[in-house]
Image (cartoon, rainbow, N blue to C red):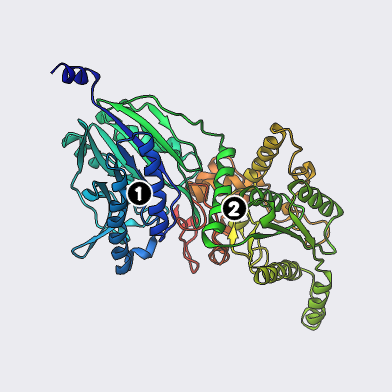
């Protein structure tokens, strides 16, 4: 009796571990193996519960794989097999996200595995259908809470979007939950972590519930999941925080449902987070798809310099090849700066002049072009020659071409179909030009802080941007200053403001009208662009779905 009294005085102690893991869509065996590895680590840490991310068994988002009946059969077998393999850790409960098909309906589910069995299953209530999410296309919502008693503490289970509203947390609380275990596949964008914390404090902390938030980490096509898993106490305070952009096991003790202080990884600046997301996106896109390396067309400009630096950090110099393809319009400083950049990175570098090929094109088209002025036709031929050369090298050696176009260019069509748009993965597709410069400065600052020379030569950052497709060309011959252009893109494309609102905000009316027209006219180009990494809350890709054939004009809205 005295022993029991002493135990009661110490309170109910439960150790919860978060498995912040990098899953691959469709790789049931690989994902199960990663969960088992984390379970072994959690067991060594004497954890009672291991929480994995949303749909951790199959990876997220599976998209239309979820419409294949066979996918659910494999998922069921993988879940049962995982439960049996977890018998090796008899004291550990593991919460696993998985797809579930029952009685003609499909669910986004989370099951508790213990003792070789599935001891409970929860199905997601709130299904997001906005931005990059299409869950209502695939799943049926469910409204039944699941609360599990573990050593005297009652844990409710929610899945991601459930906690962006109050119904599911409140339902768990009504069933006696003290702590919410939340499985998440929450993709990264700038300022996303602040949005998560504010939302969860509004929908979970207000009920006095503590919360364990396990987030996926890794790249999946254009999405990057940043991890940054955390634990909140019942007042909304951060008790523990996992790192961004890498796998981790975060362990936290709960006493009577109250989390005790744990590890707390500091979050980096906006530039650090954007750079980390891009590096992870490149590494996982190539790694998960089996590409042996990457090719980049180097120009001596800031965009290709940033792309090469990112790719070198993601892949290592040995898996990267930069190709300079100078024309008669390439400035000497472009050669000099490109060679200096490559020397600092230690990447393989080759030069393939395009003038002989360009001359042959002009000769073949001489009759058709006779008497007509030089225009974008000749400029685009040069860009397409470069694209053809890079794709030829890609076909011959198996490396993927990383394109170097930024969001500002993609918005207004300052890019060439089958030219600089030719490639397999668009690394900085969602990075506006002004952010390109900030990321270059940030990367150089990291090098200096490490006692090294800056990676990107200063002249690349200070010279006027140019496509170098005609004599004395600069980007500002065709575009507003990038500070103006990027502000218009951000307000119109990312925040949905009208032309009138943007103009009222102080931006030049002529520039606003011209940029919005260019955004509309170049939708057909963007549809043909390679997939690229998303780092803002609205990128040109999954969350931008405007019709190409379209007579709507912004002025019609009043």
Residue 272 visible in the picture: yes
Q: Earlier in the sequence, mark 1 or mark 2?
A: 1
For mark 2, give the secondary structure. Answer: helix
Left or right of 374? Residue 228 is: left
Q: Position of residue 224 (x, y in %)?
A: 49, 49
Please tell me whether mark 1 or mark 2 is closer to you in this view: 1
Q: Which residue is mark 1?
A: 54
Picture quadrant where residue 102 is located? bottom left
Above or below, 549 against 293 in this view is below
Q: Position of residue 543 (x, y in %)?
A: 45, 55
Q: Residues within 10 Å of mark 1 (few under 14, many from 20)?
A: many
Residue with the mark numbered 2: 407
Quadrant of the drawing holding the N terminus = top left
Q: Which residue appears at 40% of the width and 56% of the height? A: 61
Q: Position of residue 26 (x, y in %)?
A: 40, 61
Asked whether the viewer can see residue 371, the reply is no
């Amino acid at each position: 009796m005295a022993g029991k009294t002493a135990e009661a005085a110490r309170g109910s102690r439960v150790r919860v571990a978060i498995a912040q893991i990098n899953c691959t869509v469709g790789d049931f065996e690989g994902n199960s193996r990663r969960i088992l590895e984390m379970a072994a680590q959690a067991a060594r840490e004497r954890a009672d519960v291991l929480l994995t991310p949303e749909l951790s068994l199959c990876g997220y988002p599976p998209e239309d794989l979820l419409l294949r009946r066979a996918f659910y059969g494999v998922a069921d077998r993988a879940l049962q097999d995982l439960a049996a393999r977890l018998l090796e850790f008899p004291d550990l409960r593991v919460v696993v996200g998985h797809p579930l098909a029952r009685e003609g309906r499909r669910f986004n589910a989370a099951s508790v595995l213990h003792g070789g069995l599935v001891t409970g299953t929860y199905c997601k209530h709130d299904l997001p259908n906005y931005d990059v999410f299409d869950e209502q296309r695939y799943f049926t919502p469910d409204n039944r809470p699941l609360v599990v008693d573990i050593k005297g503490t009652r844990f409710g289970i929610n899945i991601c979007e459930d906690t962006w509203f109050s119904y599911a947390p409140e339902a768990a609380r009504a069933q006696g939950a003290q702590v919410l275990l939340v499985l998440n596949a929450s993709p990264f964008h700038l300022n996303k972590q602040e949005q998560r914390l504010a939302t969860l404090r509004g929908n979970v902390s207000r009920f006095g519930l503590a919360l364990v938030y396990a987030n996926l980490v890794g790249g999946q096509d254009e999405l990057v999941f940043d991890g940054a898993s955390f634990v909140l106490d019942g007042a909304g305070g951060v008790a523990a925080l996992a790192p961004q952009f890498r796998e981790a096991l975060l362990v936290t003790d709960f006493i009577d449902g109250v989390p005790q202080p744990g590890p707390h990884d500091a979050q980096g600046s906006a530039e650090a987070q954007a750079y980390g997301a891009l590096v992870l996106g490149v590494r996982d896109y190539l790694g998960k798809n089996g590409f042996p390396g990457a090719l980049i067309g180097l120009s001596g400009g800031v965009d290709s310099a940033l792309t090469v630096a990112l790719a070198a950090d993601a892949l290592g110099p040995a898996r990267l090849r930069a190709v300079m393809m100078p024309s008669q319009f390439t400035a000497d400083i472009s050669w000099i700066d490109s060679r200096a950049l490559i020397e600092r990175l230690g990447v393989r570098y080759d030069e393939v002049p395009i003038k002989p090929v360009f001359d042959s094109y002009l000769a073949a088209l001489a009759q058709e072009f006779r008497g007509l002025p030089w225009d974008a036709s000749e400029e685009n031929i040069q860009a397409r020659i470069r694209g053809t050369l890079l794709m030829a090298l890609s076909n011959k050696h198996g490396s993927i071409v990383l394109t170097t176009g930024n969001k500002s260019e993609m918005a207004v069509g300052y890019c060439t179909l089958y030219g600089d748009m030719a490639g397999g993965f668009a690394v900085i597709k969602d990075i506006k030009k002004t952010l390109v410069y900030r990321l270059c400065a940030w990367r150089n600052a990291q090098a200096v802080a490490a006692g090294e020379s800056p990676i990107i030569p200063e002249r690349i950052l200070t010279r006027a941007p140019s496509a170098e497709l005609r004599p004395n060309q600069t980007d500002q011959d065709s575009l507003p200053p990038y500070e103006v252009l990027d502000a218009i893109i951000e307000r119109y494309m990312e925040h949905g403001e009208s032309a009138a609102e943007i103009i009222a905000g102080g931006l030049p009316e002529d520039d606003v009208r011209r940029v919005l027209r260019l955004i509309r006219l170049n939708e057909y180009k963007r549809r043909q662009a390679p997939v690229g990494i998303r780092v803002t809350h609205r990128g040109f890709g999954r969350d931008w779905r405007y019709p190409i054939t379209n007579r709507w004009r912004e002025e019609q809205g009043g």
